[in-house]
Amino acid sequence: MSNPEFENHPNAYFSIMTFENQLTDWSAASISPDFYLSKVGAISGNGYVGIRVFSLRKDVEYVQNRLRQPLKKDSVYCFSAHLKLSPGSRYATNAFGFLLTKEKVFIDTDELLSVKPSKNLNTQILNYKTQWMKVQCTYTAKGGERYLTLGSFQNHKGLMLIEVPGQSPECYYYMEDVSLVPIDKEEDCACNFADAREKNVTSDWVRQVELTKRTGFENLQVGDTVILDNIHFDNDASKLLAASFSTLYELLIFLQKNKKVDVKISGHTSSVGGYTHNVVLSERRAAAVKRFLTNNGIDTDRIEIEGFGPDYPIASNATEKGQKENRRVDFSITHQ
């Protein structure tokens, strides 16, 4: 590795939100990774970086290192990095991995699922906020790899999430002391993630966590309908607002835990505005909810959508309060 502790930063005199190439041999491999200068936060020295590996609102982020020399074909290397979940993150996840390439890369998040990492370290959830967690595994070189890219390459269908105390609907990790060193045999690397060996040595600080969060949807039967409270849109718009994500996360967890359940997402509006316009708008709002779920790993075939416009009010359209109640999204169980 070059500059493994982020201490060489001749063009960074203070913390930089959205750094590009101010660190020696490190560069952004996506939009907006961050660089921090803090004696309090770092393991040693002053420097460390921050990347978002899962979010309900923003793009995920990647950083890239130019290795000191190309990797040798069939040689075995020990990779390690120290990670710590940020205090503000509301979720912890298993989404972390690395990509080794001959050429410099830039990750297009719109095409992320077509990117195949060198190692997907996805068997354990990284959930510590108060201490650094060391992830470690082996890698056998294909030969000529010169760039190491770090971030989340996890297919959403395999994503694991747990909720932790925090305000931001994301998983944002600090990263320090990154290492990639040649070793004579795999046993020289005390791996805590699966590698070529039959047995995986699990570290003391981390464990695989199942999705255990309970929701209000647990006892639903086929035909039951639930109004999704706190799903919000701007007036006459179909883009989900941030206040919606807490409820959407509960529905996401329910569908992840109950993999045989199929649902129908229905959009509704008040009677204000033209009828045809409202029907189209209600369908777009239902589609926005479906898009959130499928973007986070739920099969599209499990979700049906329909827009009913103003046809099924649950309150009077004569008042603003009633109109607000009628502008809603609900879901029903169609199969389980």
Image (tube, rainbow, N blue to C red):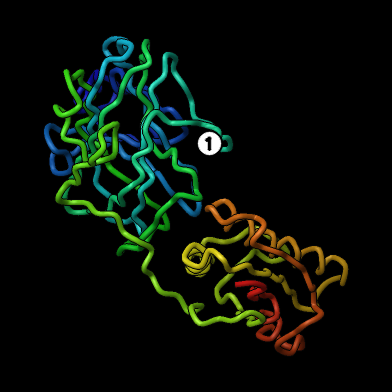
Residue at point 82% right, 68% down? 279
Q: Left or right: 190 with respect to 253? A: left
Q: Is residue 168 above or below residue 331?
A: above
Q: Nearer the viewer, residue 107 or 211?
A: 211
Quadrant occupied by the C terminus:
bottom right
Q: Is residue 31 visible?
A: yes
Q: Nearer the viewer, residue 321 or 206?
A: 206
Q: Left or right: 95 with respect to 113? A: left
Q: Quadrant of residue 11?
A: top left
Q: Nearer the viewer, residue 285 or 15?
A: 285
Quadrant occupied by the N terminus:
top left
Where residue 65 sits: x, y (%)? 33, 22
Identify the residue position indicated by label 1 in the image.
112
Q: Is residue 325 above or below residue 294?
A: below
Where residue 95 sits: x, y (%)? 38, 45
Where residue 49 sits: x, y (%)? 29, 35
Q: Left or right: 218 with respect to 193? A: right
Q: How many marks?
A: 1
Q: Is residue 154 above or below residue 65?
A: below
**Judging from the image, what secondary structure is the residue with disc 1 in?**
helix
Residue at point 77% right, 64% down? 281
Amino acid, disc 1: Leu
